Image (spheres, rainbow, N blue to C red):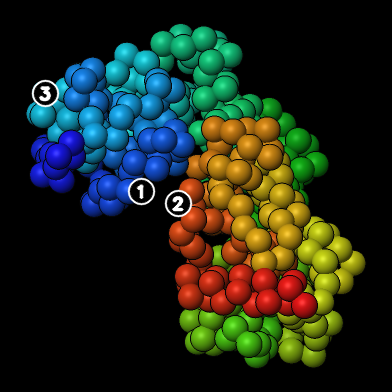
Amino acid sequence: MCFDRRMIPTATPISPTIAPPATLPDFETCWRAVLTRDRTYNGRFWFSVRTTGVYCLPSCAARPPLRCNVAFHASPAAAEAAGFRACKRCRPLEWETASGLSRPVADACRLFDAADPQDPPSLAAVARSVGLSAGALGKRFANELGVGPRDWLAARKRDRLRRALREGTSVSDAIYGAGYGSSSRVYESSDRALGMTPATYRRGGAGARIAWTLADSDYGRVLVAATERGVAAVFLGEDDARLERELKRDFPAAELARDDRGLKDRVQGVLARLYGRKPTALDATDVPLDILGTAFQWKVWKALTEIPAGTTRTYGEIAQALGKPNAARAVGRACATNPVSIVVPCHRAIGSSGSLTGYRWGVARKERLLADERRRSSK
């Protein structure tokens, strides 16, 4: 027999930055990931090839091996303990399972974060430090994080500003400490950076009001929250108290107020989407949105609304449609951070194996949503 499941050894990780996953996927899932060069499984397992004596990442671009010559390992150390050496093509030791990023990208992020915000290093300098050209590092950022270095740095700058304001730092000190050259740049883009002005954000969201309400549906309770500009959150569940806690966790700095009557039209619009009575284009007049996201997240969310009801797309297929075939992991993160379930139908995104995983409101609910959509579409 070519394959012996006892060939999957475990061992102490080869370095502190590379830790084995809690469990290996099953053999068929691993084999399918190797055949499709699925980057979303990088760091979840490594595979070795008996005839070549090397071990690789699932996404390795080398010619696929024969199934009977393959074994799967929980870590690079496990593969090396079994007598295999690292592939020079995919460089499996560069992958960090803890962050889900390749080592050059993870190291570049750390270098950017450690630098003086007022005097950040150039992309070329950081790229040289991690052994890549600026162009190669930029491509890796786009593939693994969904955005280029410039957009990533802008997001980190906004994060520093939010954190400093939450900690009580004065507005001017927070602005300059985050790396902004002038306060006017922040106020011009405060809606995008904070959802409110810096002074309001520092006061814990005083003056920023989010109304919310709950409604019954065939899929359990639905929580709808909205600002005066549009819907900010749509949650699904069974327990009203838990849904309210989820809302407070997602919007800790806002003034939350229940308003059943005032949100009646918003709820009707969301329920119409839930039952397939309305198209799901972003920013439609029946359900205007007030949500924050990066340019890449908005691209993913828009792509989700274009998937026909009752059908699904894998994260890799969505990434391919966006022109970023290696960004399946970033697509998955964008789906996971979707704040408006149903309006942005992230339940139509699935794993590469076809499994209905990764749905915040439960796999069973996701399965039922898709089944009902297929039933309605077939009429």
Q: CA distance from mark 2 to mark 3?
A: 30 Å
Q: Is 118 in front, or is 12?
A: 12
Q: Which mark identifies residue 29? A: 1
- Say left or right for 139 vs 129: right
- Say left or right for 102 vs 275: left
Crowd class of label 1 (few under 14; some 14 to 19; many from 20; radius 10 Å): few
Q: Which mark identifies residue 353? A: 2
Q: Which mark identifies residue 83? A: 3
Residue type (three-letter) at the residue carrying disc 2: Ser
Residue type (three-letter) at the residue carrying disc 1: Thr
> Which quarter of the rendering shows the C terminus?
bottom right
Q: CA distance from mark 1 to mark 2?
A: 7 Å
Residues marked 1 and 2 touching at CB (< 8 Å)? yes
Residue type (three-letter) at the residue carrying disc 3: Gly
Query: Relative to 17, does residue 281 appear above or below in the rendering?
Result: below
Query: Relative to 348, does residue 239 appear above or below in the rendering?
Result: below
- Say left or right for 263 vs 37: right
Residue 74: x and y in percent read 21, 40
Residue 84: x and y in percent read 17, 22
Name the residue rendered at 82%, 66% in the picture.
Answer: 279
Specify whether residue 182 is in view: yes
Residue 259: x and y in percent read 73, 86
